[in-house]
Image (spheres, coloured by chain):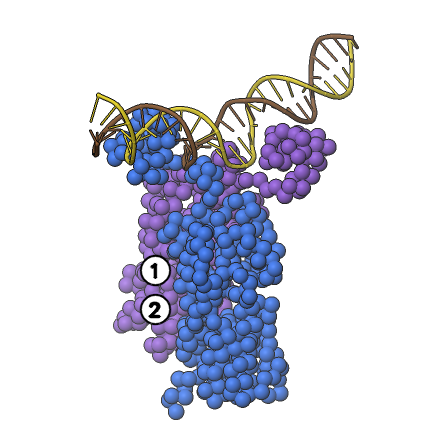
Chain colours: A blue, B purple, C yellow, D brown
Amino acid sequence: MSDVAKYANVSTATVSRALQHPESVKEETRQKVLAAITALNYTPNVLARQLRRMETKTILVVVPNIENNVFSQLLSGIDAVANQKGYKVLLGNINHKVDKIYDYLDHFRQRQIDGMIMLISDLSDHILQDLANELPLVITPDSSDDAIVPTVVVDNVGSSQRATEHLISLGHRRLAHIAGPLHLSSSKSRLEGYRQALHENGIRFDHELVKAGDFTIQAGFKQMEQLLLMEVPPTAVFCASDEIAMGAIKRIKQHGLKVPEDIAIVGFDNVKFSSIFEPALTTMAQPLEEMGRQSMKVLIDRMNGKTLSKNHFIYSADLIIRESCGAHLNKRE
Amino acid sequence: MSDVAKYANVSTATVSRALQHPESVKEETRQKVLAAITALNYTPNVLARQLRRMETKTILVVVPNIENNVFSQLLSGIDAVANQKGYKVLLGNINHKVDKIYDYLDHFRQRQIDGMIMLISDLSDHILQDLANELPLVITPDSSDDAIVPTVVVDNVGSSQRATEHLISLGHRRLAHIAGPLHLSSSKSRLEGYRQALHENGIRFDHELVKAGDFTIQAGFKQMEQLLLMEVPPTAVFCASDEIAMGAIKRIKQHGLKVPEDIAIVGFDNVKFSSIFEPALTTMAQPLEEMGRQSMKVLIDRMNGKTLSKNHFIYSADLIIRESCGAHLNKRE
DNA sequence: AAACACAATGTAATCGATTACAAACCCTCA
DNA sequence: TGAGGGTTTGTAATCGATTACATTGTGTTT
C-alpha cells in the first residue's frame, strides 16, 4: 500500500480513503490512486483491514450433516444471500456430533466470525441464550421455542396437522407416525401436529402407533418394521421426513404390501429425490432455500445492530400431493 | 494480551511464547501465564496472529452445486481432514456459474485463504496453471489432464470401461451412453472408457448411440427420450452419473418398458439414493469421501511447501451390482 | 483584503499478536 | 572467580491497513 502511495504521490491515508470513502477524496487524486493501483497490481490485504475494523465479513453455518439434502438446500439459500452481501460462509459440519459445536464456538470467541447460523438447535436454551448474547446468532430450521434467539422455521405443528388430516380425509382412521429424534423441537412439533389432527377428528391417540428414531432412511425402515409387526398394522403413516418415508416404503414393499394401496404414506421436506421415488412421495414442501435466504438476511440485520421487531419467522409448508398417499386412486374411483 | 502480561508479571512476548512455543519458556512462568489467562478469561485474537504470520488456516472449496450428493460427500471428506488439522473450510458455491470462480480467486489474492480445492475444473489449463503458481491448489474429482496442478481423481476411463464391459458380459451388443457435459474432462474420460470397451469387444462405435447433456435427472430423462425414438433403441445404456441413470429409467418406465428386462442401465457415482431407487442402480462407486480426504491431505502438503513426488492420485471405482443391469436375472435362469 | 467555512490531504496512532535481537540470568569449568 | 555457553526473558519492530486529529488548500463573503 505504501508503494501505491509513493507511486501516486500521496499518503497511505489517501489511498485508503480513495478506496473506502471515495467521496472524501478529490476525483482527480482518486484517479491517480486508481492508476497507481493497477500499475502496481496491488490488492489490499484484507487481514489488516479486519484487524483494524474488528470484523471478518465471515459467518459460520453449523450443519448437522452436509450430505442431507435438506441442509444443502438451506445452505444454498444462505450462501446466495451471503455472497450477494459480501459475506463469506464458513462450513461447520458437526456430523451429528453435538459436542463439536463447542469447537466452533471458539471461532467466534476468537473473533474469526461475525455471526453464526445454526441448522440444528440441539443445545439447551440456556446455552443458546448465552451464545446469542455473545454474538449474532440465528437458528433454522429447528426452533428454540421460547428463547430470544431469532429463528426461521416452518410451522411444523400446523404443517404436520395438515399432512395428517390429508390422510384422514382419504378415509384413514388407523394412522401411525414415525417421528424424528424427539429431543429436537421440530420432531416434537411434528408429533404434536399429528396428535392434534387426530384429536380434532375424534380419533384416539395411541402411543403404540408412534415410533421415533432419527431422520434417516434406515430409521424409517426399522420403525416401519415395528409397525408391520402389530396385530393390526396402520393403514397410513405420516413420516417426519422424506427419508423416513422412503425407508418405510421400502420396508412395506419388502413385506409384500403396496403403497399406497395397502398403506398410504406422507412425508415431510420435499427432498430432491422425493418426486422421482416410486411411488412419488406426497409430502410437505418446506421452502428451504427461501428459509436459508431469510436466515441470512436476519443475521445480517443482527450483525448490523438492528433490533428486529420480529424474532421468529414462520413459513408454512405446502402439501404436495403425489402418489404415496393414494389420493390419485380415490379420484379414479 | 498485555493485560495478561501485566497480571502474570511478564512481557507480552513471554505470554505469546508460553502459548506458541511452550518449550522455550520455563515451566514455572508458563504456569503463571496460564493462570493469568484463565483468571482474565483471555482468548487470543486470531486476526492479529494471521496478519503477522500471513496465513489464515482457511481453505476454500469451490463447489459447482452443493445440492448434488457427489459434492457433499467430497466436502464431507475434505471437512473431516481439515478440521482434524486445524483448518477451516470456506464454502464457495458457484452454482454452475463458472464466472463466479473469478470472484473467489480474489479471496486468495487478498490473502484470505491459504489454499483451494476445486471440485470442478471447467477452467482452461492455462488459467489453472497461473492459479497454481499463485497458491496451493488441488483439483478433484475432475482432472485437468496434463497440467501440473495436483489432482485427485477416479480412473474414469478404466471404470467406465468396466461398467460397459459388465453390460457387454450380460449379452448386450447395442449399448448406448448418456454422457455428462463434454467440456468436462471426467465426461470425456467416461465416454472414452465406453468407447474402449466397445472396441475391445469388437462392437462398432456408433455416435448415434451417444447423447450428452449435463449430470442431472432431467438430462437423463431427455436424452433417454432421444434414444427411445430410434428405430432400433439400445438394449443397454451406460449413464455417466446416477442422476442421469435415474432420469433415464424414469423415462423408460414412462415409455412402458421395463428396467432391466427391456433395457439395462448402469450408472456412475453410487449416490446416496442409488440403492433405494427402484430398480436399485448398478453403478460404479467412487470412494468420494476418501477422495475428499486425500485432496485435503495433498493440499496441506502443498501448503507446507512439500514438493510431492506424485501429483495425480488415481482411485479406482468399484462396480456395485444391484438390479438395474439385470445381472440378478441372468443368475436365476 | 481579511476572515471564515469547508474540502482535501498528511501525520501518526492503532488494531493485537509474533519474533528478531538484545539483555539478563544461571551454570559449569578452568 | 571469571569466562563462556545455554537458557529465559524483555524491548521494540513488524504485519498492512484504517482513522482521529492536525494541517494545508480553496473558495466565499463582507
Mark 2 belongs to which amino acid? Phe
Instruction: State the residue in front, B269 or A194.
Output: A194
Q: Residue at x 73, y 32 (%)?
A: B28
Q: Residues within 10 Å of mark 1 (few under 14, many from 20)?
A: many
Pointer 2 indicates a residue of which chain?
B
**Side of A298 relative to A23 (left or right):** right
Is A247 situated above or below A258?
A: above
Mark 1 belongs to which amino acid? Asp
User: From mark 2 to mark 1, how far is it between C-alphas?
Assistant: 11 Å
Q: Residues within 10 Å of mark 2 (few under 14, many from 20)?
A: many
Q: Residue at x 49, y 35 (%)?
A: B51
Q: Which mark is residue A156?
A: none
Is A273 situated above or below D9?
A: below
Q: Residue at x 41, y 67 (%)?
A: A287
Q: Is residue A129 visible?
A: yes
Q: Residue at x 47, y 65 (%)?
A: A312
Q: Secondary structure at mark 1?
A: loop
Q: Secondary structure at mark 2?
A: helix
**Side of B34 relative to A191 (left or right):** right
Screen quadrant of the N terminus of chain B:
top right
The quadrant where residue C26 appears: top right
In primary-sequence order, the first of circles 2 and 1 is: 1
Q: Say which residue label 1 marks.
A: B214
Q: Is residue B259 visible?
A: no
What is the total number of numbered labels drawn onto the structure image? 2
Q: Say which residue label 2 marks.
A: B221
Horizontal and vertical percent position of residue A282:
44, 77
